[in-house]
Image (spheres, rainbow, N blue to C red):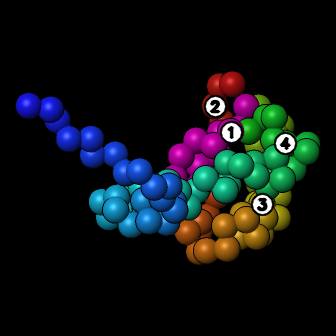
Amino acid sequence: MKKQDRRKKQIENISEIMEDLPKSDVLKVGFELLPILEHWKEIMGEEYYLDTSFSGYRKGILYVKVHNNTTLDRLIYEKDRIMNKIREVIKTELIKDVFFELGDE
């Protein structure tokens, strides 16, 4: 007996596919964070984007790995500008704070 081909023959809209996915907060947050990664250079600025990387997200805090002490010190002073850029990009209150941590490249 042949297995039925369960693939749909029509093209589906991404919003329809998303509705069919299990309601997972992790998945939802992941999709909401994507624009931050896509606009990393714009958010961090030309001067800092190569010395930083997305490290994680937990309970409203965006963790940013910084690759050297000098940049870390400078970013602490740039925190308000970075938060404003993040809010422009994602337009939600998902990110309440940014935490910079020193890490390897």
On whether residue 58 falls in the magenta region, the answer is yes
Determine crowd level at label 2: few under 14, some 14-19, many 20+ residues with C-alpha closer than 10 A.
some
**What amino acid does circle 4 point to?**
Tyr
Q: Earlier in the sequence, mark 4 or mark 1?
A: 4
The residue lying at 81 percent from left, 34 percent from top is: 50
Highlighted range, magenta: 53-67
Residue drawn where x is 34% and y is 62% of the image: 20
Please name whichever residue, 2 or 69, is drawn nearer the observer in this view of the structure. Answer: 2
Residue type at tag 1: Ser
Which of marks 3 and 1 precedes in the sequence?
A: 1
Label whose residue precedes the other's in the sequence (3 or 4): 4
**Residues under labels 4 and 1: Cα distance?**
10 Å
Q: Are marks 1 and 3 in contact (CB under 8 Å)?
A: no
Q: CA distance from mark 1 to mark 2?
A: 10 Å
According to the picture, the residue beneath numbered tag 1 turns out to be 53
Image quarter for residue 47? top right
Q: For residue 82, which numbered disc appears in the image?
A: 3
As for residue 64 lying within the magenta part, the answer is yes
Q: Are circles 1 and 2 on residues that touch, CB within 8 Å?
A: yes
For the C terminus, give its image quadrant: top right
Residue marked by disc 4: 48
Disc 2 versus disc 3: distance between alpha carbons? 19 Å
